[in-house]
């Protein structure tokens, strides 16, 4: 049977421009999560740099390649924690990437280590759907999301606004992933009293529609006048949260926090919804042409 993996999402409050401090605080959060039993740890979008940059000139000096010091610090932490606990460790988080063509990307890294601390994988995903002012800072990714094989299972990665495109989530889900990791920075938007943030509801829908675990890791704090939802969650393939951050209409009520949940990966590998139905087997792709027709 597939293993049960303890997943953690570390909801943090990055400080804009403070790369060294942000990395140090995030590494400490990863360490604390693993000491509590976590194997797969997810961090927020752009956790190394903060988010609300004025322009590319302000952002560019803080961007790094995936082989740079920030991602390397997380890889080294994963290796040290794997050796300490004698089990594999996988870390996913967002960073401002300066790619091999000197292009700025809103990206997420995946680093992992085997139980003996040896490196297992290092991968990068580049956000394909840029939100609002991100279009003035970054170039969108132009490759479909791909599954990453890790010692703890097959994971997928999308970033924030990507979750609003069900065809994008289905693209990665069809690659047989167990857990979809989604680093996010969700700004607060008006909503009726008592309602859950729509971003969290969308993530729940994605988990249920594709029968996968979804781990969203949001941020908190105020950054240049922007308030954040603080909508971190770990969601079961049936669509119900296993762990959910506290939030109010004006942002994350619980502030910085780490949520953990045990995820039986077998639940994500069972795609049946009745004796005669399944979310993969019932697909009719020959009828879906309009969904993938190029935009006009």
Image (cartoon, rainbow, N blue to C red):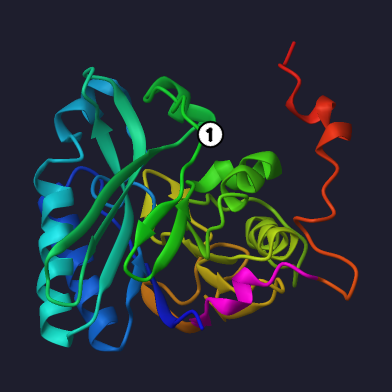
Task: Give me the residue at 45% from left, 61% from top.
Answer: 154
According to the picture, the residue beneath numbered tag 1 turns out to be 131
Residue 48 falls within the magenta-colored stretch? no
Residue 265 falls within the magenta-colored stretch? yes
Instruction: Residue 108: give x, y in percent of width and height.
Output: 35, 46
Would you call the spot at circle 1 few (<14 residues within 10 Å), some (14-19), or many (20 or more)?
Answer: few
Residue 146 vs 4, above or below: the answer is above
Work out whether residue 128 or residue 50 is closer to the camera in this orientation and state it: 128
Label 1's element? loop
Q: Quadrant of the C terminus?
A: top right
- Quadrant of the rendered image containing residue 99: top left
> Is any part of residue 152 visible from this angle?
yes
Q: Which residues are magenta?
A: 263-272
Instruction: Residue 201: give x, y in percent of width and height.
Output: 70, 62
Task: Give me the residue at 37% from left, 43% from top.
Answer: 224
Instruction: Residue 181: give x, y in percent of width and height.
Output: 46, 58
> Is any part of residue 43 visible from this angle?
no
- Quadrant of the rendered image containing residue 246: bottom right
Residue 32 vs 103, above or below: the answer is below
Q: Is residue 49 left or right of residue 247?
A: left
Work out whether residue 146 or residue 6 is closer to the camera in this orientation and state it: 146
Q: Is residue 61 left or right of residue 128?
A: left
Work out whether residue 186 or residue 74 is closer to the camera in this orientation and state it: 74
Task: Give me the residue at 68% from left, 65% from top.
Answer: 211
Instruction: Residue 97: give x, y in percent of width and height.
Output: 26, 34
Task: Give me the residue at 57% from left, 53% from top.
Answer: 188
Q: Is residue 207 left or right of residue 23?
A: right
């Amino acid at each position: 049977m597939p293993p049960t993996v303890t997943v953690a999402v570390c909801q943090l409050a990055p400080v804009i421009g403070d790369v060294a401090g942000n990395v140090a605080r995030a590494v400490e959060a990863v360490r604390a999560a693993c000491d509590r039993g976590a194997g797969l740890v997810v961090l927020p979008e752009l956790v190394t740099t903060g988010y609300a940059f004025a322009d590319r000139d302000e952002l560019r000096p803080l961007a790094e390649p995936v082989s740079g010091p920030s991602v390397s610090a997380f890889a080294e932490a994963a290796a040290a924690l794997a050796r300490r606990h004698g089990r594999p460790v996988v870390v996913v988080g967002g960073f401002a990437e300066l790619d091999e063509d000197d292009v700025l990307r809103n990206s997420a890294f995946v680093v992992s280590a085997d139980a003996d601390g040896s490196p297992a994988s290092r991968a990068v995903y580049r956000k394909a759907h840029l939100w609002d002012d991100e279009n003035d800072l970054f170039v969108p990714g132009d490759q479909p999301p791909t599954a990453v094989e890790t010692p703890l299972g097959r994971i997928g990665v999308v970033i924030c606004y990507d979750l609003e495109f069900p065809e994008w989530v289905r693209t990665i889900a069809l690659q047989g992933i167990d857990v979809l990791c989604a680093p996010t920075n969700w700004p607060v938007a008006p909503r009726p009293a008592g309602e859950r943030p729509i971003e969290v509801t969308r993530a729940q829908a994605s988990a249920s529609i594709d029968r996968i675990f979804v781990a969203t890791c949001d941020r908190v704090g105020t950054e240049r006048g922007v308030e954040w939802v603080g909508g971190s969650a770990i969601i079961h393939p049936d669509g119900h949260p296993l762990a959910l951050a506290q939030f109010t209409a004006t942002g994350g009520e619980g502030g910085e926090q780490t949520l953990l949940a045990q995820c039986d990966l077998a639940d994500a590998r069972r795609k049946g919804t009745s004796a005669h139905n399944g979310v993969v087997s019932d697909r009719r792709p020959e009828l879906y042409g309009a969904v993938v027709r190029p935009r006009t």
